[in-house]
Image (cartoon, coloured by chain):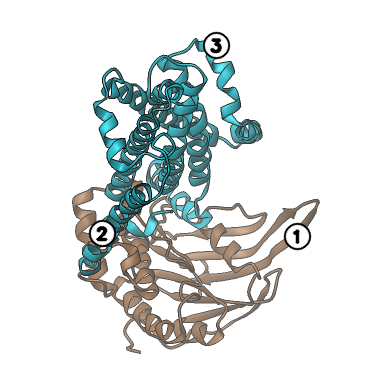
Amino acid sequence: MDKSADRLPRYTLAVLMHVALIMLWYLFVKFSDVPKFVMPSPADTFNSLFTEGYDWWGNTAVTATEIFGGYFLALVVGVGLALFFTWSKLLETAFMPILVSLNMIPKIALGPLIIVWFKYGILPNTIIAFSICVFPILLTTVRGLREVEPELLDLVRSLRGSRWQIFTKIQLPGALPYIFSGMKVAAILAVAGAIVGEFLGSDSGLGYLMLQVQVTLDTAAMFMAVVLITLIGMSLYAAVLLLEHLFIVRDARID
Amino acid sequence: MNDKQAFIHLADVSKSYQRGKESFLAISNVSFNVMPGELVSLVGPSGCGKSTLLKILAGLHPHDAGEVRIGSADAPFDPKRDIGMVFQQPLLLKWRRILDNVLLPAEILGLPMKESRERARDLLQLTGLAGCEDKYPYELSGGMQQRASIARALVHDPKLVLMDEPFGALDALTREKMNLELLRVWKESGKTILFVTHGISEAVFLGTRVVVLTSGPARMATTSPSICRTRAHST
């Protein structure tokens, strides 16, 4: 049980620190001679939301679709492949070295290729986001599925338990905390993947918008785009934390 | 002691392992009997092959030579249902509450859940964990976790309980207490228990008989005569 007495001050402090950071930003811009196109104030940044023609809503929706889509796809494929690979020792021995090698490829470097293969737009950016966050999920899931106490297996085998029972009662629930630790890493990477895709070639999304407003030196709008991208990432991360909180017993969580 | 009446009958049991290219002998010509309802201590130095012997009895490893028989005409033995195991670590599933942890063997064997749940509650009572049913393992001390793992070993009502240094990871005071508790549980449940330990005093204190094995490969050093502690006696 959490000590709710320390929780309130802790959350208050966290909110206060965020407000303080924005205040610092505000004061810095107000009392220094930095031109607006180098460093806009918090108010300028917020006001850029009302600039005509930027289609904030539409661009945010596109970027969010790419991030969430790529992430969800990576979750399904990553966990699915991990289950497949760990089902038998042979599959695992055959495929794990390949996976480790593939994981070493800087996924960002695949961006131009993916755009050649899938044209430009939401699909290739989703695929870039997918390719960058599938490996952490896959590798942590494999690790979690392997991490079973040998004596626990002895216990189940002494009862002549089946492979399927070992999997559903011991392996899979035991791997869940690992899956979540991979999901947390992947949540941060998915955002980077989608934005890189938009930088490389795209006709919509917040990354695309940033390149557009960069030309006109609308730095406030660039700031706003970064803020919105961060918010999308934070909401994804928060959703993962919430699920982890619901499904994983405190003692079993892995940070 | 009559071999026919023995619940466990081991005669000249040997077992060797392949370690790389060399084969090394873990158990050599071990013979002893365990009568129904006995608590026999198996004592020997660390790494002498005591655990291997338990694994052979649990049907997890085959033996190479000799005779291994469990069960007798009076007490038939079902290798699937009649073994409960307790290890040095409690090995509770972190994500399950204590009651659900205790129920694991019943689930694996597909026993009727309603009765098993009743039984699990009774066993938690017996092992001194009443009120802990809905707690998670991390909320319990090491000794209490080990009590839960003993309850788990009994939930499917096995005839034989194999214990592999179950109190080895506990502090001295808790261990003494758990020894007394185990004697109580043994008397109340009427199980045949084979208790592996490397502590001689623990072995002597707990066992109705003590089987002493030599350092690896495990060979019979001696078997103590039956100590006068039967279920009728109090300790």
Residue A185 point in image, percent of width and height: 46, 42
Q: Nearer the viewer, mark 1 or mark 2?
A: 2
Q: Give the residue drawn at x 43%, y 14%.
A: A121
Q: Identify the hue of chain B.
A: brown
Verify CB contact (< 8 Å) between mark 1 and mark 3.
no
Q: Which residue is mark 2?
A: A11
Q: CA distance from mark 1 to mark 3?
A: 58 Å
Label 1 neighbour load within 10 Å: few <14, some 14-19, many 20+: some
Gap between marks 1 and 2 measured at Cα: 61 Å
Q: Please report the residue visible at 18 percent of the width from the left and 51 percent of the height from the top.
A: B114
Give the amino acid at mark 2: Tyr
Q: Is residue A177 above or below residue B76?
A: above
Q: Is residue A206 above or below residue A162?
A: above
Taking the image as shown, residue A157 lies to the left or right of residue A90, namely left
Q: Earlier in the sequence, mark 2 or mark 3?
A: 2
* Residue B156 visible to the viewer: no
Q: Position of residue A165 (x, y in %)?
A: 40, 42
The residue wearing badge 1 is: B24
Residue B32 point in image, percent of width and height: 57, 71
Q: How many marks?
A: 3
Considering the image in quadrants, where does the N terminus of chain A appear?
Answer: bottom left
Q: Secondary structure at mark 3?
A: helix
Q: Quadrant of the C terminus of chain A?
A: bottom left
Chain letter for the cyan part? A
Most foreground residue, A138 or B168: A138
Amino acid type assigned to the residue bearing label 1 in the image? Phe
